[in-house]
Image (tube, rainbow, N blue to C red):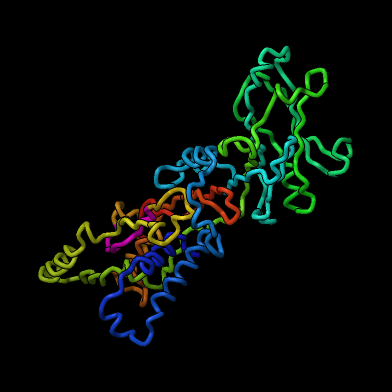
């Protein structure tokens, strides 16, 4: 299976190429072909990113992603979207969902229809922004309260123990303010398995003695009356199981045309004179440092592709590509494998017919992170393996 970076290289040549005059001259009867090729290229690029179609939120205007998601992206990715440390993120997908209920009570409902059943739910968190107590009750005698989060099992029996299931509970200082996070993984797993079981969440606030706390003393921001940056939010960490196989090179076939090396000169046979050695020396002088296997820039611009309307970060990234020859003898600077070294020797000695020179390919690949809006305007952080050629070698 070819790594993603090879596919990106091929697609970008189609997406950003400017057809020549000769091209148009020879395709007068197929004017729609460039558009068709571009359409197929974009479709394949979407497949690389695990999508069938681009999200419809292309005119999101001034809609801002949650600060939590921006901070998480900046924690796991550098300015170009490349993963800083593959162990920082749990799974490969993080989604944020806003409350759809906007109830006056402390009840919340989240639409998880965009999460596939095949995804492995790792962690689910309910993020609530706690407001300061109103000034009239600022000197309330209560310093702590018990906040509990329940999964609603029966909407008509929510006041009974049979109508709800405790998910998380802890003490919270009454006079603090800021984000409070509760783990609700069990409920979300059941909702993914059976969507009809998603009846929402209920939050209760009680004194340490067990009585109901005055709503003026402890308040959480709602999506109806408070700034969007403080809206109740569900954050879901999953893994979709998409992993890429390591790069493979066909040792019996030719390298990609973009990195096809020139024909290697023959090694001198026994008894060859100085003139033959001189010709061989001239041949090898053609392999300058600039033509040997090395990494070259390959910038993928999401705005040029037409994806800037739904991708938050990065605006593009450098995928790089590998190009150049792998001439005999292979030096350590070309990072050859033992297999490539043997193949290079066999090719140079012409011991076996049809054996080509080793190919210049990525020998180290990095993942990138994409922060974007999906069809429901949820913000998604997704990590994609093998998207950047970290270094090149002869294989």
Kindly identify the residue that appears in the image at 28 percent across and 55 percent down: 331
Residue 393 visible in this rendered orientation of the protein:
no
Judging depth in this view, the residue of 208 and 318 nearest the camera is 208
Q: Can residue 263 be found in the magenta stretch?
A: no
Kindly identify the residue that appears in the image at 68 percent across and 27 percent down: 219
Judging depth in this view, the residue of 307 and 239 nearest the camera is 307
Q: Residue furthest front?
A: 136
Q: Residue furthest left?
A: 275
Judging depth in this view, the residue of 391 and 227 nearest the camera is 227
Horizontal side of residue 185 vs 381, given as left or right: right
Kindly identify the residue that appears in the image at 32 percent across and 56 percent down: 297
Kindly identify the residue that appears in the image at 84 percent across and 44 percent down: 155
Residue 290 on image: x %, y %: 22, 58
Residue 279 visible in this rendered orientation of the protein:
yes
Q: Which stretch is magenta?
A: 318-330
Q: Quadrant of residue 221?
A: top right
Horizontal side of residue 89 vs 288, given as left or right: right
Residue 346 on image: x %, y %: 34, 68
Judging depth in this view, the residue of 255 and 134 nearest the camera is 134
């Amino acid at each position: 299976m070819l790594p993603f970076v090879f596919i990106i290289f091929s697609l970008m040549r189609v997406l950003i190429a400017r057809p020549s005059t000769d091209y148009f001259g020879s395709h007068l009867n197929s004017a729609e072909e460039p558009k068709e090729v571009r359409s197929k290229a974009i479709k394949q690029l979407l497949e690389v990113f695990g999508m069938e179609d681009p999200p419809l939120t292309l005119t999101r205007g001034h809609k801002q992603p949650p600060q939590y998601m921006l901070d998480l992206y900046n924690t796991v990715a550098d300015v170009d979207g490349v993963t800083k440390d593959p162990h920082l993120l749990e799974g490969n997908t993080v989604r944020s969902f806003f409350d759809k209920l906007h109830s006056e009570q402390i009840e919340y409902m989240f639409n998880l229809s965009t999460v596939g059943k095949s995804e492995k739910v790792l962690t689910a968190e309910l993020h609530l922004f706690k407001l300061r107590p109103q000034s009239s009750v600022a000197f309330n005698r209560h310093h702590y309260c018990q906040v509990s989060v329940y999964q609603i099992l029966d909407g008509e029996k929510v006041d009974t123990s049979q109508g709800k299931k405790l998910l998380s509970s802890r003490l919270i200082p009454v006079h603090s303010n800021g984000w409070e996070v509760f783990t609700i993984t069990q409920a979300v797993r059941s909702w993914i398995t059976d969507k009809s079981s998603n009846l929402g969440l209920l939050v209760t606030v009680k004194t340490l003695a067990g009585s109901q706390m005055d709503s003026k003393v402890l308040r959480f921001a709602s999506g109806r009356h408070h700034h969007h940056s403080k809206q109740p939010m569900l954050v879901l960490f999953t893994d979709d199981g998409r992993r890429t196989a390591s790069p493979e090179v066909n040792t019996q076939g030719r390298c990609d045309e973009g990195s096809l090396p020139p024909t290697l000169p023959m090694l001198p046979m026994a008894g060859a004179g100085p003139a033959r050695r001189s010709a061989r020396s001239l041949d090898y002088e053609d392999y300058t440092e600039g033509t040997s296997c090395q990494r070259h820039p390959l910038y993928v611009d999401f705005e040029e592709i037409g994806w800037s309307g739904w991708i938050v970060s990065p605006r593009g990234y450098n995928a790089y590509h590998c190009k150049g020859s792998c001439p005999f003898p292979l030096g350590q600077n070309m990072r050859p494998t033992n297999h490539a070294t043997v193949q290079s020797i066999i090719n140079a000695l012409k011991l076996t017919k049809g054996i080509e020179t080793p190919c210049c390919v990525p020998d180290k690949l990095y993942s990138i992170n994409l922060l974007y809006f999906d069809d429901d305007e949820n913000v998604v952080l997704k990590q994609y393996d093998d998207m950047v050629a970290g270094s090149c070698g002869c294989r």
